Image (cartoon, grey):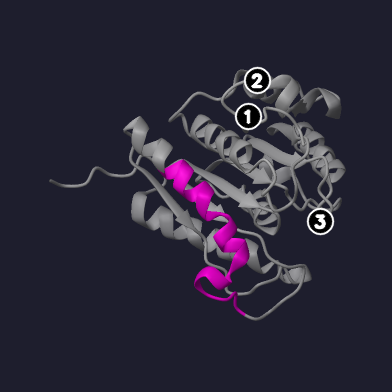
Amino acid sequence: MAQRPASAAVLVLHGGRETGTGPPPSGPLNLPGTRMLPFVRAVSRATRASGDEVLVRQVRYAHRGWNGARADPLHDAVAALDVLREEAGEELPVVLLGHSMGARAALRAAGHPLVRGVVGLAPWCPPGDPVTQLAGRDIVLVHSNRDRMTSPQATQSLTARARRAGARSCMVTVRGGDHAMIRRAAAWHRLTTALVTGLLGSGSLPGPVGAALALPPTAEPTEGTLDLDADLGPGPFQDRTGAAR
């Protein structure tokens, strides 16, 4: 039986370093890449269960770091999107799923014609990064309030700037989480899967997220910021405790 053509795709971009021109290690030694495997598996299971033919691929980096103006992972992301366009055509909707440096690359690559949305986990959002490329896209950023590697305040600021630039954007705070997404791991996985499949149309987007994405450009940053426990729970996105730790 011939395989049905893909109806959508998810590109997964793992984290990295601020600087580092050497290639990432391979296999399990690439810890940032390994960290995203549970997300890859969860999204793949969910899209299969929906009956949709969704490609889920991890982007391979040529270099470990962002490396200043070189923005190396951005070019890797764009190259992966161009490959998808060659394989599946101009109409393939793509959601970018990135963590930390990978989320920064996803946000910067969101102007590519295939991209419909970005889900950024613990994103690295420097204040001067552009947002005009996010116009017309759905942007959901998820950040722990205890993150010590990247700034949740910077994420909230970028969410508001993106909305003013024409994006549909919001932020979800995971109380008691951490940058590596190990604390409250199950909640991170379930929420991320719901966001990705919801943006693709393979599942239902959480109601409060949909409402936040519909806010007008003039909305205050706090209006577009949701709390996982207070606004989305209790429910399927909770871990076993159902509360911040």
| Nearer to us in this view, 230 or 207 | 230
Q: Is residue 39 left or right of residue 7?
A: right
* Marks 1 and 3, how far apart at CA: 23 Å
- Tag 2 residue: 234
- Which numbered disc, 1 or 3, marks the residue closer to the eye? 1
Q: Position of residue 26 (x, y in %)?
A: 52, 74
For residue 215, say whether it is visible: no
Callout 2 secondary element: loop
Quadrant of the rendered structure where residue 209 is? top right
* Marks 2 and 3, how far apart at CA: 28 Å
Q: Position of residue 148 (x, y in %)?
A: 84, 53
- Which numbered disc, 2 or 3, marks the residue closer to the eye? 2
Tag 2: residue type? Pro
- Tag 3 residue: 149
Badge 3: how crowded within 10 Å, few (<14), some, or many (20+)? few
Q: Is residue 201 above or below residue 133?
A: above
Callout 1 secondary element: loop
- Quadrant where the image shows the C terminus: top right
- The disc placed on residue 121 is none
Specify the segment rendered in magenta. Answer: 23-44
Mark 1–mark 2 contact, CB under 8 Å? yes
Q: Is residue 101 left or right of residue 129?
A: left
Task: Indicate which disc, 1 or 3, sits on the residue closer to the N terminus.
Answer: 3
Tag 1: residue type? Gln
Is 30 magenta? The answer is yes
Task: Indicate which disc, 2 or 3, sits on the residue closer to the N terminus.
Answer: 3
Q: Is residue 197 above or below residue 71?
A: above
Is 183 magenta? The answer is no
Residue lying at 75% horizontally and 48% vertically, measured from the top left: 178
- Tag 1 residue: 238
Q: Position of residue 74 (x, y in %)?
A: 64, 61
Residue lying at 66% horizontally and 69% vertically, measured from the top left: 72
